[in-house]
Amino acid sequence: MIPHGWKDNGTILTALNNVPVKAGFREHILNYPGGWNADDWPLAPEQSLSETEFAIHSGAGSRQIFRTLMLVWYPARGVVTAWTGAELLVYIKLSDAQEKQIAALKAQLKTA
């Protein structure tokens, strides 16, 4: 089922914000039990990555980030919904570590 207001040309599903959804992610949305929430549009196009979910060290696949969740595709598993809270926590920890490193480097520069 095509989410209300979205467009589908048989290959590309286009969300309200004109961001495309393709291949397995398109099929996942069209076949979502009860229908996909039309307001849960993608924030960016699909990305192919060597590390798809940092929180679980998932390996290669592709992902597409939506307003409320992240869809991930793996060759062996197909499309799954990622735990965005776990992913967010990883990025927060990385950001905090980088902030500390920046502060330490600034202190070193000041004394140099």
Image (cartoon, rainbow, N blue to C red):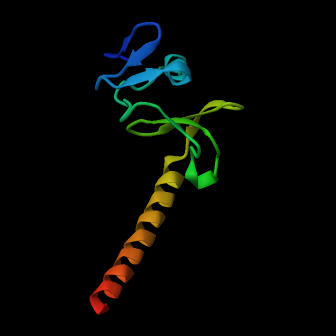
Quarter the C terminus occupies: bottom left
Q: Position of residue 1 (x, y in %)?
A: 47, 12
Which residue ends up furthest to the top in the rendered image?
Answer: 10
Which one is nearer the viewer's eye here, 33 or 41? 41
Which one is nearer the viewer's eye here, 44 or 15? 44
Q: Is residue 19 above or below residue 91?
A: above
Which residue is at a point 58% across and 46% down the rendered structure image? Answer: 51
Residue 45 appears in which quarter of the rendering?
A: top left
Which one is nearer the viewer's eye here, 6 or 98? 98
Which residue ends up furthest to the right in the rendered image?
Answer: 76
Residue 101 appears in which quarter of the rendering?
A: bottom left
Which one is nearer the viewer's eye here, 19 or 85? 19
Q: Is residue 17 above or below residue 9?
A: below
Q: Is residue 9 above or below residue 54?
A: above
Q: Position of residue 23 (x, y in %)?
A: 53, 19
Q: Is residue 79 above or below residue 106?
A: above
Q: Position of residue 20 (x, y in %)?
A: 39, 22
Q: Position of residue 62 (x, y in %)?
A: 55, 35
Which residue is at a point 35% across and 86% down the rendered structure image? Answer: 108
Residue 80 appears in which quarter of the rendering?
A: top right
